[in-house]
Image: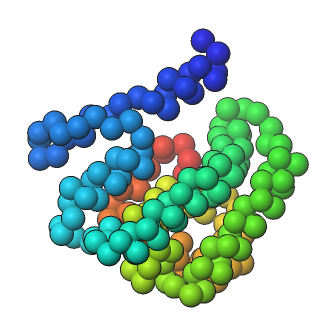
Amino acid sequence: MASTEIVAVVQFVDVKVILGGVFVKKIGESRAITKYIAHAYEGKGTSLINKDKNQMANIVVWMEVKAHRFDPIATKLIHELLFTDFFGKEIDNAFVEENEAQLAKVLDVYKARLAMSKYLACKYFTLADLDHMPALQYLMRTKVKQLIDERPHVSAWCKDGLTRLAWEKVWALQEKRLKWLN
């Protein structure tokens, strides 16, 4: 099977969502899964969504920005800087520099937004912020951390998200699975 065929198969695998021990639904995309869980657990703990249609629209917009502007570049950098070496290959510094320049432009947009608001979508932490945490957690283990730290509002937002108790618990579970990254 060609690698593009494998990606096509993996991208659309259905995940069974089980809440309270009961099978609820099959969902095949991570943002759909997080949206479903955020709605299912609304009112329990920190609310990640908003009933106000304008603020909910802002949450959705920033999730789309993440999916289409931030993630493609962040994913390339994460793979190149963390996983290339693991597989015994040499890091392509030209590729890294090109993608760092692209990510810097995206982070400048975030910098402008976060200068006006502590969080991306509104004045409190939402699904739009949470959606960024996995990639940020990995990026902060690379030299890309400097691009984030050079932008004080982006750095503060990143630190705020990555030090939330719930995220720290999630990441602790992930670290057990990825001991080789430490």
Residue displayed at 28% across by 71% down: 51
To which quarter of the image does residue 4 belong?
Answer: top right
Where residue 64 appears, x then y in whole percent?
53, 57
Figure disc tally: 0
Q: Is residue 148 left or right of residue 94?
A: left
To which quarter of the image does residue 149 belong?
Answer: bottom right
Q: Is residue 137 visible?
A: no
Residue displayed at 29% across by 51% down: 36
Residue displayed at 84% across by 53% down: 98
Where residue 175 appears, x then y in whole percent?
44, 50
Above-or-below relation of 95 to 15: below
Above-or-below relation of 142 to 14: below
Q: Is residue 166 left or right of residue 119?
A: left
Above-or-below relation of 33 to 104: above
- In the orientation shown, which residue stands out farthest toward the front? 53
Where residue 127 appears, x then y in whole percent?
39, 64
Q: Quadrant of the N terminus?
A: top right
Task: Decide which of 129, 69 is in the foreground and name it.
Answer: 69
Residue displayed at 21% across by 55% down: 40
Where residue 117 appears, x then y in whole percent?
51, 85
To which quarter of the image does residue 108 belong?
Answer: bottom right
Report the colour scheme. Answer: rainbow
Q: Is residue 99 visible?
A: yes
- In the orientation shown, which residue stands out farthest toward the top? 1
- In the orientation shown, which residue stands out farthest toward the bottom? 116
